[in-house]
């Protein structure tokens, strides 16, 4: 099997896994929104946002550092793999224990600070949520380091499917938002235990361990967690702290509007997330082998095809946001419409960073990315604090888009330093994609006012897809023959 065939195979597995996970997550999102209502739904995801912040300290950058060194050593010295895993697991166990003790002692005070006493039982459940979440993350990233993308995708899908079944069942049984959170915990436990079994078999049963760990390797694993932790911290400030601040300044109902809008955007990210997850270790491997030009062409193709999908998708979100939210979630969530329309730009930015950010970690540029991420995340917090009291939930969305735009541009600049990208060619292709998007909007916009139910909504989406496909093919941005050959 050629390298291209191998990448296509891995991407296919990861893409299917992401689709299954995304559909499961999307269905759960709708079920919970309908059954819980805006207040309980917002309370549940406010708790999850708090766990996201605490999760930075329980996970640090240990899992990704482990994955990076697995990628490095699996070919040149596989006997070190068991030692790398053993040390990383011990590091992670220590961090989870410290955070768990802190949460146990401070959960009531945290609920008081957030002015949400109803959070207390949710925060107590965090004593189980945080360790199993950390374990699930560790196994998935470790499998990525082994380039076992197929297995990682399967474990990820198992996590989301079990979450859908268990969380929905507990809510239907009358256990409310707290029952839904128990479903999250159990799904993390199932996925992490299955993933650990696969990792153990891959690293301990099929490899003869070296007699001792390479001198300095433990220190290097620990040191590389520092920039990764900084990036993860900044990531949480971008993706979780805004939700916490919405809850602090406004209410759980406002949290529900913001979370639903972000979840819709994340629902659309499955294809590009799968592509980025699959390609990231390959970029590192290609650079290690001296094939920088080949890696650069691979990145350019991935980026332009991602933008070809997500720039028109963002325009479509703006056009059909109102009928989509009303039909899917109910009229109680219509105040989320302007938030979703603003965050449509975030979908484009995510399309770029999903291809770029993880690749930088495998290229050894985690420190550079961490510096940029830290600066933009701090700016995001400042903008949230400034805009939420004035503009409400829309202020949080604006802050996210502004700061993430800066972060995205910096990511592209850093990878350009590594790959020497053909920026002129990329600019011309992006210009063509914008032209295709404009043509699609011109055709679809007049029909937008006639959406009054599911049949008309589906019809207008299909119309947009048809126009997009036709214009993309005519302009040469979409090579149908090449896709058919690849498939």
Image (tube, rainbow, N blue to C red):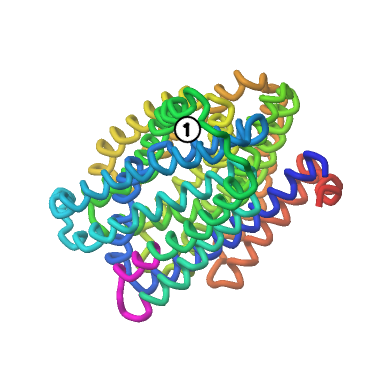
Q: How many numbered discs, if any?
A: 1
Is the N terminus in the top left, top right, bottom left or bottom right quadrant? top right
Q: Quadrant of residue 90?
A: top left
Q: Position of residue 304 (x, y in %)?
A: 68, 36
Give the vertical position of 93 relative to 251 (above or below).
above
The residue stretch that appears in magenta: 171-184
> Is 165 positioned to the left or the right of 208 in the image?
left
Query: Is residue 174 part of the magenta span, yes or no?
Result: yes
Q: Which residue is mark 1?
A: 405
Give the vertical position of 366 relative to 143 (above or below).
above
- Residue 209 vs residue 159, the one in the foreground: 209
Q: Position of residue 149 (x, y in %)?
A: 64, 49
- Which residue sits at x=36%, y=38%? 399
> Is 326 positioned to the left or the right of 171 in the image?
right
- Which residue sits at x=47%, y=23%? 216
Magenta segment, prevailing SS (helix, strand or loop): helix
- Residue 253 vs residue 287, the one in the foreground: 287
Q: Is residue 475 visible?
A: yes
Q: Position of residue 261 (x, y in %)?
A: 43, 54
Give the vertical position of 144 relative to 177 (above or below).
above
> Is 22 positioned to the left or the right of 6 in the image?
left
Q: Secondary structure at mark 1?
A: helix
Give the vertical position of 362 relative to 257 (above or below).
above
Characterize the local packing of mark 1: few (<14), some (14-19) or many (20 or more) Cα atoms within 10 angstroms.
some
Q: Is residue 254 visible?
A: no
Q: Position of residue 102 (x, y in %)?
A: 21, 46
- Which residue sits at x=56%, y=47%? 314
Farthest residue, direction front = 211
Query: Is residue 5 part of the magenta span, yes or no?
Result: no
Q: Quadrant of residue 400?
A: top left
- Residue 311 vs residue 106, the one in the foreground: 106
């Amino acid at each position: 099997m050629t390298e291209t065939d191998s990448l296509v195979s891995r991407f296919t597995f990861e893409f299917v896994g992401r689709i299954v996970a995304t559909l499961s997550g999307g269905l759960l999102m709708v079920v919970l929104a309908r059954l819980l209502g805006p207040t309980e739904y917002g309370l549940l995801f406010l708790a999850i946002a708090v766990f996201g912040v605490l999760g930075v300290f329980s996970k640090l950058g240990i899992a990704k550092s482990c994955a990076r060194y697995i990628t490095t050593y699996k070919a040149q010295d596989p006997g070190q793999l068991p030692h790398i895993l053993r040390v990383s697991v011990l590091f992670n166990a220590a961090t989870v224990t410290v955070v768990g003790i802190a949460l146990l002692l401070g959960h009531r005070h945290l609920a008081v600070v957030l002015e949400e006493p109803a959070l207390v039982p949710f925060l107590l459940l965090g004593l189980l949520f945080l360790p199993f979440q950390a374990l699930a993350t560790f196994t998935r990233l470790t499998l990525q380091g082994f380039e076992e993308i197929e297995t990682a995708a399967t474990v990820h899908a198992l996590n989301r499917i079990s979450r859908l079944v268990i969380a929905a069942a507990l809510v239907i049984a009358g256990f409310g938002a707290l029952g839904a959170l128990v479903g999250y915990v159990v799904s993390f436990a199932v996925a992490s235990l299955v993933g650990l079994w696969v990792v153990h078999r891959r690293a301990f049963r099929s490899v003869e361990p070296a007699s001792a760990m390479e001198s300095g390797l433990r220190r290097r694993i620990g040191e590389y967690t520092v920039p990764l932790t900084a990036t993860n911290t900044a990531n949480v400030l971008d993706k979780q702290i805004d939700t916490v601040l919405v809850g602090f300044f406004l209410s759980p109902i406002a949290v529900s509007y913001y979370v639903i809008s972000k979840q819709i955007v994340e629902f659309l990210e499955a294809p590009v997330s799968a592509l980025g997850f699959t390609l990231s270790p390959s970029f590192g491997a290609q650079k290690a082998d001296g094939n920088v030009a080949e890696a650069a062409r691979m990145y350019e193709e991935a980026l332009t095809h991602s933008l070809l999908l997500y720039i028109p998708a963002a325009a479509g979100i703006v056009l059909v946001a109102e009928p989509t939210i009303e039909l899917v979630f109910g009229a109680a969530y219509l105040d989320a419409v302007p938030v979703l329309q603003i965050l449509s730009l975030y979908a484009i930015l995510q399309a770029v960073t999903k291809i770029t950010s993880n690749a930088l970690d495998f290229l050894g540029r985690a420190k550079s990315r961490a510096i940029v991420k830290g600066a933009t995340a701090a700016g995001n917090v400042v903008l949230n604090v400034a805009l939420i009291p004035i503009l409400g939930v829309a202020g949080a969305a604006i802050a996210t888009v502004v700061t993430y735009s800066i972060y995205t541009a910096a990511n592209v600049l850093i990878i350009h330093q590594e790959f020497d990208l053909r920026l002129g060619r990329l600019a011309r292709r992006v210009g063509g994609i914008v032209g295709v998007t404009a043509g699609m909007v011109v055709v679809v916009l007049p029909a937008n006012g006639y959406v009054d139910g599911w049949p008309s909504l589906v019809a207008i989406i299909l119309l947009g897809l048809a126009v997009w496909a036709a214009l993309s093919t005519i302009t040469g941005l979409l090579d149908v023959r090449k896709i058919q050959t690849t498939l």
